[in-house]
Image (cartoon, rainbow, N blue to C red):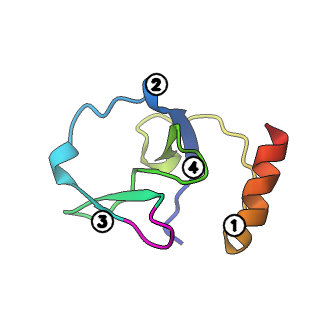
């Protein structure tokens, strides 16, 4: 519902150039994921997912330039099973 289109970016290929002071974070469930959002407008532009601990999940909808994406479905309601499917794909 938030319109988040996940684009996985390895930590070493990501640089936040501005706005760090406006970020707030929260964790829930297992606490493994760190969800970041702008404390002024509430936009969730990127976060640290538990499914990909070595990458940031960037919201492609927040990028200034459009990127070509291949969309893969992920069943968040059945997270463990969906994650196992990702692991099988490599």
Q: Which mark is residue 6?
A: 4
Residue 22: within the magenta?
no
Provide residue 5's location: percent of width, then percent of height: 57, 53
Q: Position of residue 3 (x, y in %)?
A: 52, 62
Q: Nearer the viewer, mark 3 or mark 1?
A: 1
Give the residue at x 19% y 63%.
40
**Callout 4: SS:** strand
Circles 4 and 2 in contact, beta carbons < 8 Å: no
Whole-angstrom CA distance, mark 1 to mark 2, is 26 Å
Q: Nearer the viewer, residue 61 or 12?
A: 12
Q: Residues within 10 Å of mark 3 (few under 14, many from 20)?
A: few
Q: Nearer the viewer, residue 8 or 28?
A: 28
Give the SS element for disc 3. loop
Q: Residues within 10 Å of mark 1 (few under 14, many from 20)?
A: few
Q: Which residue position holds label 3?
A: 42
Q: Tell me which residue sits at (52%, 38%) in the image.
A: 55
Position of 63 relative to 5 (above/below): above
- Total labels: the figure holds 4
Residue indicated by mark 1: 79
Could you tell whether 36 is left or right of 88 in the image? left
On screen, residue 88 versus residue 5, left or right, reads right
Mark 3–mark 1 distance (CA, rounded to whole Å): 25 Å
Where residue 37 appears, as percent x and y from the top left, is 32, 59
Residue 13, numbered circle? 2
Lower position in the chain sequence, tag 4 or tag 3:
4
The stretch in magenta equals 27-31
């Amino acid at each position: 519902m938030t319109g988040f289109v996940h684009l996985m970016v390895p930590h070493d290929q990501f640089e936040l150039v501005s706005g760090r002071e406006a970020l707030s974070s929260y964790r829930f469930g297992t606490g493994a994921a760190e969800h970041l959002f702008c404390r002024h407008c509430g936009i969730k532009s990127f976060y640290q997912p538990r499914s990909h601990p070595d990458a940031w999940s960037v919201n492609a909808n927040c990028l200034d330039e459009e990127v070509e994406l291949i969309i893969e479905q992920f069943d968040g309601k059945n997270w463990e099973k969906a994650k196992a499917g990702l692991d099988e794909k490599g």
